[in-house]
Image (tube, rainbow, N blue to C red):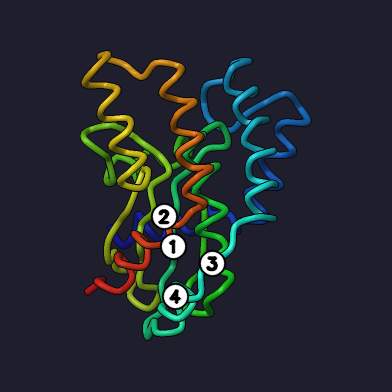
Amino acid sequence: MKVLIEKSLGNSYSYKEYRNHVSQLLLEGLSTGDTQSEDLTHYSTLNEVRMNRLDKTITIPGEIEERLRGLTKEYTLLVISEGWCGDAAQILPVINKLAEASDKLHLRIVLRDENIELMDNFLTNGARSIPKLILVEPATIAVRGSWGPRPQGAAQLILDAKEKFGHIPAETKADLQKWYLHDKGISTMEELMLLLEQAP
């Protein structure tokens, strides 16, 4: 695992580099990932707008800031993502805000389709669901936990739809975006703080 994490970190982007990479591909009419389609490029374009908005509007509540100051160990937040992923667009700006607010946290992002071996070690119910955050201790390159692909409330919304309809209808996808809008990143922050505070 250590060799795999080191290799993945070598392929990783900073948040700014990731955003620039996705934007550059969109200028060429492309999305990240092995599969190219009009739909994926369309989702990537929507996500670009979402992330620009979230970068400006996401704020960290005082209580979370205090807990960030209480962190005693450094961590690399290694996130598996793709530009077309709607959940990643909602969650990456939040993770970036947390990393910017603490000198103990360092965000690195890898693309799923370029790092399949890593992805396959962090499946969710057997699926390559993203975003997936891997908590890495920089000194030892040891994995101290993982999180994702979405906060509990959002995950429940998707589970309920799958149970009811056997798939995820378009209206559920719209409901999911509304859920994120109302949540303002708070659930993601809370769950990530628990992961950090409970890490061995």
Q: Nearer the viewer, residue 181 or 126?
A: 181
Residue type for callout 1? Leu
Identify the residue under disc 4: 63
The disc label shown at residue 60, or none = 3
User: Which of the two labelled residues, at mark 2 and mark 3, occupies the earlier sequence position?
Assistant: 3
Mark 1–mark 3 distance (CA, rounded to whole Å): 17 Å
Within-10-Å neighbours for mark 1: few <14, some 14–19, many 20+:
many
**Which mark is in front, 1 or 3?**
3
Mark 2–mark 3 distance (CA, rounded to whole Å): 11 Å
Residue pictured at 59% horizontal, 17% vertical: 39
Q: Nearer the viewer, residue 22 or 12?
A: 22
**Which mark is in front, 4 or 1?**
4
Residue type for callout 4? Glu
Mark 4–mark 3 distance (CA, rounded to whole Å): 8 Å
Within-10-Å neighbours for mark 3: few <14, some 14–19, many 20+:
some
| Picture quarter with the C terminus | bottom left
Q: Secondary structure at mark 3?
A: loop
User: Which of the two labelled residues, at mark 4 and mark 1, occupies the earlier sequence position?
Assistant: 4
**Which mark is in front, 2 or 1?**
2
Residue type for callout 2? Thr
Residue 24 appears at what percent x and percent y?
74, 38
Q: Are marks 2 and 1 in contact (CB under 8 Å)?
A: no
In the displayed structure, 80 sits above or below 67; it is: above
The disc label shown at residue 90, or none = none
Mark 4–mark 2 distance (CA, rounded to whole Å): 14 Å
The disc label shown at residue 77, or none = 1
Q: Secondary structure at mark 1?
A: strand
In the displayed structure, 57 sits above or below 98; it is: above
